[in-house]
Image (spheres, grey):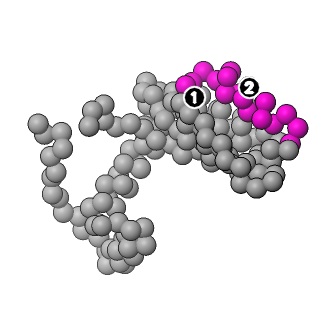
Amino acid sequence: MTKNLLVRFSVSLQKKLLDYLDTYLTKQGYASRSEVIRDLIREKMVQEIWENDDMQDKIGVLVIIYDHHHKELNQRMIDIQHQANIQILCNTHVHLDHCNCLETIMLRGDGASIARISLEIGGLRGVKFSKLTQAYHFAKDC
């Protein structure tokens, strides 16, 4: 029953760094320093897992903005997704205005394949913005 056990520990910081941390947590709406530190540690762990662990499934969310009038762009994005050796969990499509669409693509699989599909789609002519958010599911149970 120790899976959610909280452990208190002490951290020493230079005053300037602590002031920055306090400003950051206020701007970001964190309730405490502990919450900021937990998020920063998780972020670093996700980065480490993506860089060094090929055995575990990764999760990514690709956000793109593109000109939907660009010839055959939608079909090329669909073809890339169908040919990918990963799971496409979900797509969300939003019409921003007459020319621009925003799409999110939720992906699951090995990190290299997720990165590859992100680069392929992001490099298509007509894509104006592309960003992959890397994630990892730490716990198998609640």
Residue 88 has which mark? 1
Q: Position of residue 118 (x, y in %)?
A: 65, 37
Instruction: Return the residue at label 2.
Output: 79
Which of disc 2 and disc 1 is earlier in sequence? 2
In the image, farthest residue toward the right: 71
The answer to whether 34 appears left or right of 40 in the picture is: left
Q: Secondary structure at mark 2?
A: helix
Residue 73: within the magenta?
yes
Q: Position of residue 111 (x, y in %)?
A: 53, 32
The residue drawn where x is 81% and y is 52% is 99
Q: Pointers 1 and 2 in contact (CB under 8 A)?
A: no
In the image, farthest residue toward the left: 1
Report the front residue among 26 and 41. Answer: 26
The answer to whether 67 appears left or right of 140 in the picture is: right
Spatial separation of the CA atoms under disc 1 and disc 2? 12 Å
Tell me: residue 72, above or below residue 46.
above
Q: Secondary structure at mark 1?
A: strand
The answer to whether 111 appears left or right of 63 in the picture is: left
Tell me: residue 129, above or below residue 55.
below
**Quarter that holds the N terminus:** top left
Residue 107: within the magenta?
no
**Quarter that holds the C terminus:** top left
Q: Which secondary structure class fits the magenta region best?
A: helix
The residue drawn where x is 34% and y is 74% is 22
**Residue 58 seen in render:** yes
The residue drawn where x is 80% and y is 48% is 67
**Residue 130 seen in render:** no
Report the front residue among 109 and 67. Answer: 67
The amino acid beneath tag 2 is Asp
The amino acid beneath tag 1 is Ile
